[in-house]
Image (cartoon, grey):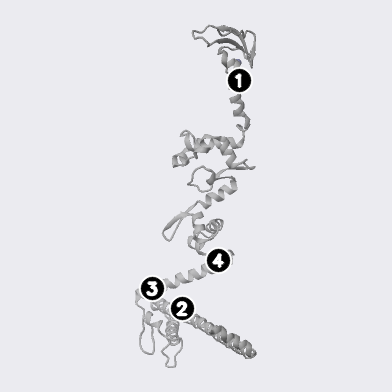
Amino acid sequence: MVKKLDLTGQKFGRLTAIEEVKSPEKNYTRWLCKCECGNEKVIARASLRSGETESCGCLQKEEVSKRRKTHGLSRTKEYYSWKSMLNRCYNMKDVGYKNYGGRGITVCEEWRESFETFLKDMGKSPEGSSIDRINNDGNYCPENCKWSTKQEQNSNTRQNKIITFNGKTQTISAWAREVGIKAQTIARRLDSWGNIELALTLPSKYGKITDVIQILNVLNKEKQMSNIFETATRKQYRYPSVKGDLTTEQLWELKLLSSNQFDLNNVAIALNKSLKAITEESFVSVKPTPGKVDLETKLEIVKHIIAYKQDEQAKARDAADKAAKREKLVQVLANKQDEALNNMSEDEIRAKLAELE
Ligand SMILES: [Zn+2]
């Protein structure tokens, strides 16, 4: 027969055994215990003796709450950030919900379930910063989040602005990756210039405003010219020449100067003469001169074609100059190589020949 153990008065952790509680089963003895906290509870003898049970349950409760407080951060900024993030995404009563949870923004499972993991991934929040998603349409997860200052976030928000160019719509950040210009630069350009094409296409080196003005002028000039050419097509302009009237397309075929005077120079001279005649006429007449604007436009077109051809000629001359210089250098190089061969000894020449066999 198993000897009955008398535990009366014995302490087991916080518990003190008071009296045995009768149990229907053999070998299953329970004891009524008094806990330090004041509670009384019936505990199996085996649990007391093995040390498995050391309190009425108050000890576990304290430990859990102690553990909850050990990170000591429940009242920190990081904890507040974490809580607010969850609220924005999952609490429909949160004022921010419509812009987060309502837009399908979620928090990754690891962060959703554990503040500790969130803190471990994000680290301490630097002074003046708050949680910021790198991609504004992305979720809250370690890859898409960082602590940013208000200023950085503003800049981020700007870089997440969506713009359309050439039929493609994406964020400034995405454009930045595509065109190889910093997102910050694009955003700044858009702010100051308001021209998407320039902001996305101007090479990075054209940061200076003076350069930009110059480029804008060129673009404006091109725009103006294309308008003028449209007018010429629409009005079916004709231009005077020694071989009769020419169309705008035919002007492009003319040379700048030609011995037979069938050239752009003579077209310009003829137009200028007519224009002058009209202008002089209008000194003595108050009648409007309807042909004047057309003549001015025609002259503008001829001048533009002349400027274009001159530019082409200058480029061609430049290219020819370079080609001539290159040819000269190649010749000198060939001479030097010949000289080097002449200076070789017979043995060296034989060796070279052998190499070629
Ligand atoms: Zn207790």
Residue 341 % position (x, y): 61, 89
Disc 2 beta carbon < 8 A from ligand 1?
no
Q: Earlier in the sequence, mark 4 or mark 2?
A: 4
Q: Nearer the viewer, residue 301 or 28?
A: 28
Question: In 3D space, how far apart are the residues under numbered discs 1 and 4 (Cα atoms)?
Answer: 74 Å
Q: Earlier in the sequence, mark 1 or mark 4?
A: 1
Within 10 Å of disc 2 (Cα), the crowding (few <14, some 14-19, many 20+) is few
Residue 304: mark: 2
Disc 1 beta carbon < 8 A from ligand 1?
yes
Q: Quadrant of residue 63?
A: top right
Residue 181 % position (x, y): 54, 60
Between label 3 and label 1, give the one nearer the viewer: 1
At mark 1, the secondary structure is helix
Say if residue 10 shows up in the picture.
yes
- For the point 47% across and 33% down, which residue is it? 93
> What residue occupies the far bottom of the structure in this picture?
259
Within 10 Å of disc 3 (Cα), the crowding (few <14, some 14-19, many 20+) is some
Please give the residue where the numbered disc 4 appears in the rendered image: 212
Question: In 3D space, how far apart are the residues under numbered discs 3 and 1 (Cα atoms)?
Answer: 93 Å
Residue 47's place in the image compared with 279, above or below, is above
- For the point 62% across and 7% down, which residue is it? 8
Question: Is the Cβ of the residue at disc 3 closer than 8 Å to that at disc 2?
Answer: no
At mark 4, the secondary structure is helix
Please give the residue where the numbered disc 1 appears in the rendered image: 59
Please give the residue where the numbered disc 3 appears in the rendered image: 231
Within 10 Å of disc 4 (Cα), the crowding (few <14, some 14-19, many 20+) is some
Q: Nearer the viewer, residue 183 or 142?
A: 142
Say if residue 325 shows up in the picture.
no
Question: In 3D space, how far apart are the residues under numbered discs 2 and 1 (Cα atoms)?
Answer: 94 Å
